[in-house]
Amino acid sequence: MDTTKHFTVLAKLFLIVFICFFSFGATIAVIPIYIKTELGFSNFIVGSTLALQYVAMIFSRAFSGNVADVIGAKVAVLYGLLAAVICGLIYLGCVITEYPIIKLSFIALGRTLLGISESLIVTGVLTWALNQVGSSHAGKVMAWNGNAMYGGVALGALGGGWLAKWGGFPWIVYAAIFFPIMALLIAQTLEKQKLIIQKQRLPFLKVIKMVFLPGISLLLSTVGYSVILSFSGLFFRAKHWIGAEIVIAFFGISFVLARILFSGMPDRFGGARVAILSLIIECIGQGLMFMASTHDLVFLGSALSGFGFSLAVPALGIEALKQIPIQNRGTAMGSFLAFFDLSFCIAVPLAGIMIQSQNYQIVYLLGASCAFLAILISIKLMSSYALQKVIAS
C-alpha cells in the first residue's frame, strides 16, 4: 500500500471515531442532568443507568475482538456504527412518551446498545490501524485513536450543552442519530482489509492473563475520567456554578494536547515508565479537584487529569501487547479495553453511593486514590520488565 493511501485509510478511521464520540459526548453531557432533574431519579439511578453502557461493553469485548480477528475489522466497525444509529432511534422514545419510568427505560436500553456499539467501533478501528502500521507503532495508533475519541467527547460535550439550551433534549436525540449515519457513510468508502491468517489463535483466557496487570492499572486510572464525565454536571449544579461542560472540555483538550506533543514517548521510552509519570500527573489533578474551592481550580484539576490520563492509556496498552501474536490483536485489544469498561461499571455506581448531602467532590478523592494505586501497579510492571532484561542478558 502506498503512503498516501495508507494515510487516507488511517485518517478516515480516526475521523469515524471522532464523529461517533462527538455524538457520544453530546449525550453524556446532558443525560445525567436529564435523568436527575427532568425525570427526578436519584444519584444512584443516574450512575447505574450510565454504567449499563460499560457493562454491555465488557460482555461484548470478546465478541468484538473475534469479529475483528476472524471476520474482519471493517465488519466490526460497520456493525458498531449500525448499532449506534439504532441507539439514537431508541432515544426517540423519550421524546414521544410522557412517563418518566418509560423514558428512563428507553435511555437504559439505548445506553446498553451504545456499549456494544462502542466496543465494536473501537476494537475494529484499533485492529484495522495496527494491521496497517504494525505493533512497533502501537503507542502512536492508540494515542491518535484516543485523540479522536476524547477530542470528540470534549467538543461533543460543548455542542451537547449548547444544543440542550437551544432546542432541549430532542435535539440531543437527533444528533445521536445523525452523526453515526455520517460515520457509516464514510466507513462504506473504505476497502475491506485482508484477514491475517497465521498460527492457531491463543485461547481467550490466556490472552486475559497476559493483559491482566496492565488492564488493572488501566481500570484504576480510568476512575478519574469516569467521575469527571458522569458527575461534573451535577457537581456544578449543586454549587450553583455555570460551565459544567467546560470541565469535560478541559479534560478532553488537555488529553488531546498531551498526545499531540508526546505521542511518541511510550514507544520510545517504554510503556511502564511513561505510565508512572502520567499517572502521577493525573493523581495531582484529581486531588486538586477534590480540594478545589472555585470552579477555576476544578477546570485546572480536570486539565491535569486529562493530560496525565492521556498517555497512561497507550503506555499501558504497549505493556499489554508486548507478548501478543498478530492473530490475537483484536482479542487482546478487546480484553485490555474491557478493563476500561469495568472501571465505569464499578466506579460510577460506587461514586453515586458515596455522594451524601450534595457533596459531589468526594468522587474526585476516589479518582485520586485509584490513580495512586495504578502508579504502584505500573512500578511493578517496570520492575518486572527490568528483571526480565537482566535474566535475558
Image: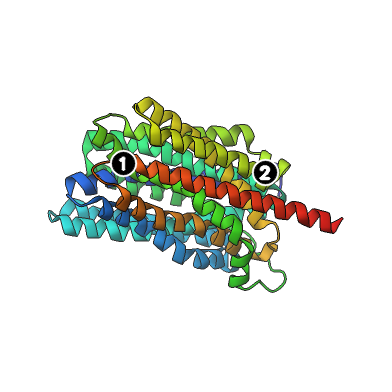
Counting from the top left corner in percent of width and height, residue 135 is at 69, 53
Q: Secondary structure at mark 1?
A: loop
Q: Residue at x 61, y 61 (%)?
A: 211
Q: Residue at x 42, y 37 (%)?
A: 154
Q: Residue at x 70, y 63 (%)?
A: 325
Q: Amino acid at mark 1?
A: Tyr
Compare marks 1 and 2 and give the one earlier in the sequence.
Answer: 2
| Viewer-closest of 323 and 148 | 323
- The answer to whether residue 191 of the structure is visible from this angle is no
| Viewer-closest of 60 and 93 | 60
Query: Which numbered tag is attached to residue 273?
Result: 2
| Viewer-closest of 15 and 126 | 126
Q: Secondary structure at mark 2?
A: helix
Counting from the top left corner in percent of width and height, residue 110 is at 31, 57
Counting from the top left corner in percent of width and height, residue 299 is at 41, 30
In the orientation shown, which residue stands out farthest toward the right? 393
Query: Which numbered tag is attached to residue 381?
Result: none
Residue receiving disc 1: 360
